[in-house]
Image (cartoon, rainbow, N blue to C red):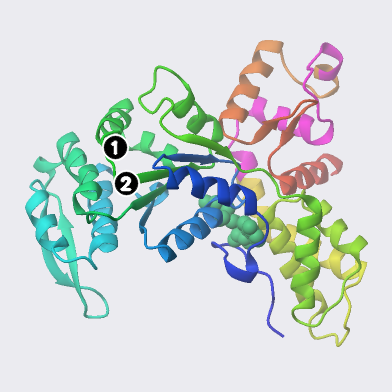
Amino acid sequence: MRNPFRYGRRVKGESFFDRVTIKRDILNVLDGGNNVVLFGPRRYGKSSLVGEVLSDLQEQGTLCAEINMMDVASLNDFVSRYAKIVYRATAPFAGAVNQVLGFFKRVSPTIGLDSEGKPELKFELSSTKAGISALRDVLELPEKLCPEGKRMVIALDEFQEVAELGLKVQFERTMRSVVENQEKVSYIYLGSKSHMLQRMFASKSRPFYNSAQKFQLDRPPEEESSAFVTERFKSVGLSISTDLSSKMVDLVGNVPYYIQALGSWTFNAVNGTGRKSVTPQDVEEGFSALYAAERILLENTFQSYSESQRTLLLALATEPTNRFDETYRNRHHLASTSTTNTALKRLLEASAIEPTTSAYLLADPLMVHHLKTIALD
Ligand SMILES: Nc1ncnc2c1ncn2[C@@H]1O[C@H](COP(=O)(O)OP(=O)(O)O)[C@@H](O)[C@H]1O
Ligand SMILES: [Mg+2]
């Protein structure tokens, strides 16, 4: 039997559930010619949602391009990758090649062959030609190459990483000044470092201030999640009780990535036994396998924080709060108020914790499990 759960890469079609309202709202904003910024913790399904948005748009005839800033090594690399995605999206329309060659003065595009032997444009930047003006040129390309009467949407994933290109606010300033005059092109900015992105779009002193409609991706409704789990098992002829599928969702804090991963490991536990229904023991086995698979990553992530941040994470994992009074600090070996506040700020910046009305919660439910486990050791 084929495993009905998918994780680790973007999902679509029958592997994708919920997100109906937010998807419609995003499409409406784009349809009105406006930009979108979408943030939310990693593994909640931002990239998958944007993938669905783009494929809907493409079906309606909108040109689409996307770039993941995590893949970008330098400013030069951004310029050539961006030229490539814009060229690919507009290539079906006559004249794109000539226009790229004409417009893109600072870059010398050459036509080479890709791995399948098909002709492909290559963009090579000489270092002397790099910099802000090359950036400006490449950012202007979409509006220039998008045919009259057509619209184009460009998604920039993990957009907060532009800060790593070493231009500081100059990238933002350049991009804002170019894109605010574009009429055919809308942008979707998305990323997992919610704080950084929010600041970029919500503080008055930043170039992107108020330039995009904000969307926050939360966890899906729990009933939708457990209905999804039930349906996925059913698609391969396995039944599961409503109680058990909601327990599965609960175990992983209703985070889409973990729902699929736990589903997958649980499926492995049942598969081959000849049984037709999922038991609590299968789920237990699935969860242990999931934790074993994630453990090294969790350990490395935990170790990447400073000592005071680790102490605070441990405290919040075992006793969530938003009031760090003296008794709480003593109980959890937290240092002074100011040290705790600094650690808190850093953890929020890193999106490791999320504020709720009653407490700061760890964004990653498996990290909570991990820290509770090591606290007992
Ligand atoms: N709408 C969804 N339906 C089902 N699974 C999802 C959904 N969104 C995300 N997932 C699961 O979460 C994983 C991570 O999704 P992704 O879109 O890469 O998240 P993000 O970009 O927020 O980090 C996917 O591989 C998939 O297993
Ligand atoms: Mg993503």
Is residue 305 magenta-colored?
yes
Q: Identify the image quadrant of the C terminus.
A: top right
Residue 115 drawn above or below residue 11: below
* CB atoms of marks 1 and 2 within 8 Å: yes
The residue labelled by disc 1 is 179
Question: In the image, is 225 to the left or to the right of 110?
Answer: right
Which mark is on residue 185? 2
Residue 329 found in image quarter: top right
Residue 224 in percent (x, y) is at 77, 57
Q: Identify the image quadrant of the N terminus.
A: bottom right
**Tag 1: Cα neighbours inside 10 Å, few (<14), some, or many (≥20)?**
many
Question: In the image, is 96 to the left or to the right of 233?
Answer: left
Q: Inspect this view and state whether residue 216 appears.
A: yes
Is residue 353 magenta-colored?
no
Tell me the distance, in whole angstroms, between the alpha carbons under discs 1 and 2: 8 Å
Residues rendered magenta in the picture: 301-328
